[in-house]
């Protein structure tokens, strides 16, 4: 496996030219197209992805440690297939629609101003993370650990507080009222 250190990749369309399999350490990807890329068993350590299209990339066994994604498109990612050891990433203004986080431990991740529509967080561990100002339209929270999670400013979520752990979680008004949906409570303003 080839090693890449402190390399910068700019405006490269990897759909025409395959990305070389290897370990990428402190590399920067700016405006690259990695749509449908096969990243199986790749390693990304302290890498930055800025305004990249990574939609439907195959990430089986792929490792992300201390990596960041900014204004990137990552639709359809199957995080449940990537290497879970030391998974740590920061997502800022990314579109992660239809991503799967089934049973994934996200305690070393954060999401800021992300679109997380139809994302599956079933049985995931989101304890003590930040989900700030995110759109969670039709996201699935099934037996999800959201204890002490900060969901300030996030919207469009449907979380059952009986089924998922929300102890100590931080919510914003009026979105927090959706936690009462399960109970059929009517609120008169």
Image (cartoon, rainbow, N blue to C red):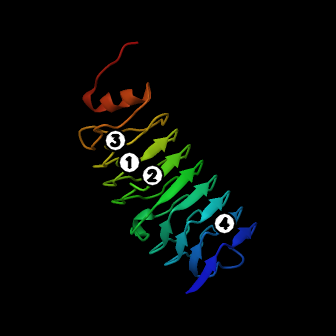
Q: Secondary structure at mark 4?
A: strand
Q: Which residue is mark 1?
A: 140
> At which x and y percent is residue 150?
42, 40
- Residue 116 appears in view: no
Q: Secondary structure at mark 3?
A: loop
The answer to whether the residue labelled 2 contacts the one labelled 4, judged by CB atoms less than 8 Å apart, is no
Toward the viewer: 30 or 162? 30
Could you give the CA–CA distance between mark 3 and mark 1, rounded to whole angstroms? Answer: 18 Å
> Disc 2 or disc 4, which is closer to the eye?
4
> At which x and y percent is residue 49?
63, 61
Q: Secondary structure at mark 2?
A: loop
> Disc 4 or disc 1, which is closer to the eye?
4
* Residue at x-position 64% and y-position 52%: 71
Could you give the CA–CA distance between mark 2 and mark 4, rounded to whole angstroms? Answer: 26 Å
Rendered-image quadrant of the N terminus: bottom right
| Circle number at residue 28 | 4
Rendered-image quadrant of the C terminus: top left
Q: Which residue is mark 3?
A: 148
* 56 with respect to 108 (left or right): right
The answer to whether the residue labelled 4 contacts the one labelled 1, judged by CB atoms less than 8 Å apart, is no
The answer to whether the residue labelled 1 contacts the one labelled 2, judged by CB atoms less than 8 Å apart, is yes
N-terminal of the two: label 2 or label 3?
2
Q: Which residue is mark 2?
A: 119
């Amino acid at each position: 496996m080839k090693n890449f250190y402190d390399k910068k990749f700019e405006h490269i369309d990897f759909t025409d030219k395959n990305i070389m399999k290897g370990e990428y350490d402190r590399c920067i990807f700016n405006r690259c197209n990695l749509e449908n890329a096969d990243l199986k068993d790749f390693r990304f350590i302290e890498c930055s992805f800025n305004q990249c299209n990574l939609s439907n990339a195959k990430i089986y066994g792929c490792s992300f440690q201390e990596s960041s994604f900014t204004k990137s498109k990552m639709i359809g990612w199957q995080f449940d297939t990537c290497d879970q050891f030391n998974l740590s990433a920061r997502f800022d203004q990314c579109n992660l629609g239809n991503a799967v986080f089934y049973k994934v431990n996200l305690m070393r991740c954060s999401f800021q101003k992300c679109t997380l529509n139809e994302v599956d967080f079933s049985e995931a561990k989101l304890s003590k993370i930040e989900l700030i100002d995110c759109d969670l339209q039709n996201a699935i929270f099934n037996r999800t650990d959201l204890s002490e999670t900060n969901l300030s400013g996030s919207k469009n979520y449907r979380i059952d507080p009986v089924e998922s752990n929300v102890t100590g979680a931080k919510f914003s008004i009026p979105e927090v009222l959706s936690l009462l949906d399960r109970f059929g409570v009517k609120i008169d303003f």
